[in-house]
Image (spheres, rainbow, N blue to C red):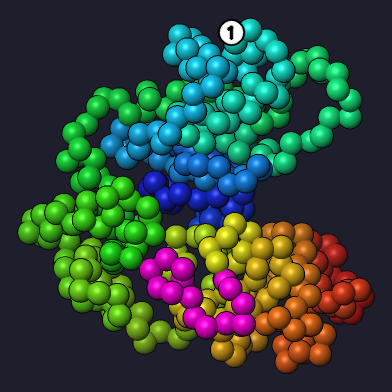
């Protein structure tokens, strides 16, 4: 799974809950922890998302030298420089060691500087635990500086410089070849729009010569495989055969995070017409029927948008989200109150019950309550 996803930029808040869990049956966080601690998998920050989230990418350690990009706009503050020097001198270090090397001070301030380096792609950790502990910083109840007995939760684990992952250095051509092969493996059919959505430096023009060379070498095909996506389409032979094989299969229902690379809407193809403004936002979800958008659940789960007439199966697909999130409470459907809307009956049949303001579906044990309780 990581081999397919490596280099894909994903919100840390959705990485395990929505993306890995959708691909690995009975996913448990320890699976990722074990691979990261063993050095088989590494994660690299790719920019902040507000104050409590950020973008990350996973890489297999043996591919990191060819795929991990250079840092973008490294921060240049005093603490940032001290952290770079300490990590360069000591190597992988726990937060307490970095705190001492940087001269003490406010541990939260040092942690903030450390995460600035993380989001810039300069520093990583030998555990995935800090990613799970991100969130808004708690407010201090007094102006007194706390005594640091334990490292801040989001600073646990050992920190190290990402620069070591890019060794030994490889040529730009080798980097582009590895990137092109990774994109082909992830998308199956690679289009200009997909490359742009991945944020590849230089866009489609950067990887086109490599894709053309792969075609000439018989490692990829070029053709017009997907209608409406332009003529510059490259595909793996196996992907083309699989596409042909599923054309006549009955449509299935799939629930994905809106930011999942497998969701083509808002990336490869435009969003269909709805009563709202769907977006590839962390915490939002799409329900696809036969690959077509049926439902869009906005971040927070309060608003549901429809694209066409969703089937009972699409509405029932919201139930796993309640298990994942604890509950889903819908207040509006297509901008109108959920009570009295055309989907109310279908939602109730899918397990939703009345709440003070709308319809709610609980996960876990509470889901076994009678409908309407």
Q: Secondary structure at mark 1?
A: helix
Q: Is residue 275 magenta?
A: yes
Q: Residue furthest left?
A: 216
Quadrant of residue 214 within the rendered picture = bottom left
- Nearer to me, 235 or 231: 231
Q: Residue furthest front?
A: 77
- Nearer to me, 217 or 229: 229
Quarter holding the C terminus?
bottom right
Q: Residues within 10 Å of mark 1 (few under 14, many from 20)?
A: some
Name above or below for residue 337 compared with residue 160.
below
At 40% across and 73% down in the image, what residue appears?
269
Q: Which residue is mark 1?
A: 101
Question: Is residue 96 toward the left or the right of residue 57 in the image?
Answer: right
Q: Which residues are magenta?
A: 265-278
Q: How many marks?
A: 1
At 57% across and 71% down in the image, what residue appears?
278
Q: Is residue 269 magenta?
A: yes
Q: Position of residue 145 (x, y in %)?
A: 81, 17
- Nearer to me, 48 or 39: 48
Name above or below for residue 42 compared with residue 252.
above
């Amino acid at each position: 799974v990581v081999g397919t996803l490596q280099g894909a930029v994903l919100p840390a808040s959705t990485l395990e809950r929505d993306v890995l869990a959708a691909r690995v049956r009975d996913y448990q966080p320890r699976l990722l922890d074990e691979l990261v601690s063993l050095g088989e998998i590494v994660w690299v920050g790719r920019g902040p998302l507000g104050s409590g989230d950020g973008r990350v990418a996973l890489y297999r350690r043996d591919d990191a030298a060819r795929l991990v990009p250079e840092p973008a706009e490294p921060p240049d503050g005093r603490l940032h420089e001290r952290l770079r020097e300490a990590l360069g001198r000591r190597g992988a270090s726990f937060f307490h060691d970095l705190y001492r090397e940087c001269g003490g001070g406010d541990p939260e301030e040092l942690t903030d500087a450390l995460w600035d380096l993380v989001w810039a792609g300069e520093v990583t950790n030998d555990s995935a635990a800090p990613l799970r502990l991100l969130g808004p910083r708690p407010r201090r109840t007094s102006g007194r500086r706390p005594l640091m007995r334990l490292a801040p939760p989001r600073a646990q684990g050992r920190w190290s410089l990402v620069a070591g992952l890019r060794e030994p250095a490889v040529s730009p051509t080798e980097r582009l070849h590895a990137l092109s092969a990774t994109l082909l493996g992830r998308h199956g059919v690679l289009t200009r729009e997909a490359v742009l959505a991945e944020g590849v430096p230089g866009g489609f023009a950067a990887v086109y010569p490599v894709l053309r060379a792969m075609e000439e070498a018989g490692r990829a095909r070029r053709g017009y495989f997907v209608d409406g996506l332009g003529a510059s389409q490259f595909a793996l032979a196996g992907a083309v055969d699989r596409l042909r094989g599923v054309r006549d299969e009955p449509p299935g229902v799939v629930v994905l995070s809106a930011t999942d690379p497998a969701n083509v809407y808002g990336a490869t193809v435009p969003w269909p017409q709805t009563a709202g403004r769907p977006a590839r936002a962390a915490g939002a979800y799409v329900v696809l029927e036969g690959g077509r958008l049926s439902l869009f659940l906005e971040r927070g789960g309060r608003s549901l948008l429809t694209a066409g007439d969703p089937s009972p199966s699409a509405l029932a697909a919201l139930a796993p989200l309640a298990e994942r999130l604890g509950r889903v409470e819908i207040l509006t459907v297509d901008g109108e109150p959920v009570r009295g809307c055309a989907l109310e009956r279908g939602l109730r049949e899918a397990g939703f019950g009345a709440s003070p303001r709308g319809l709610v579906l609980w996960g876990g044990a509470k889901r076994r309550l009678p409908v309407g309780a």
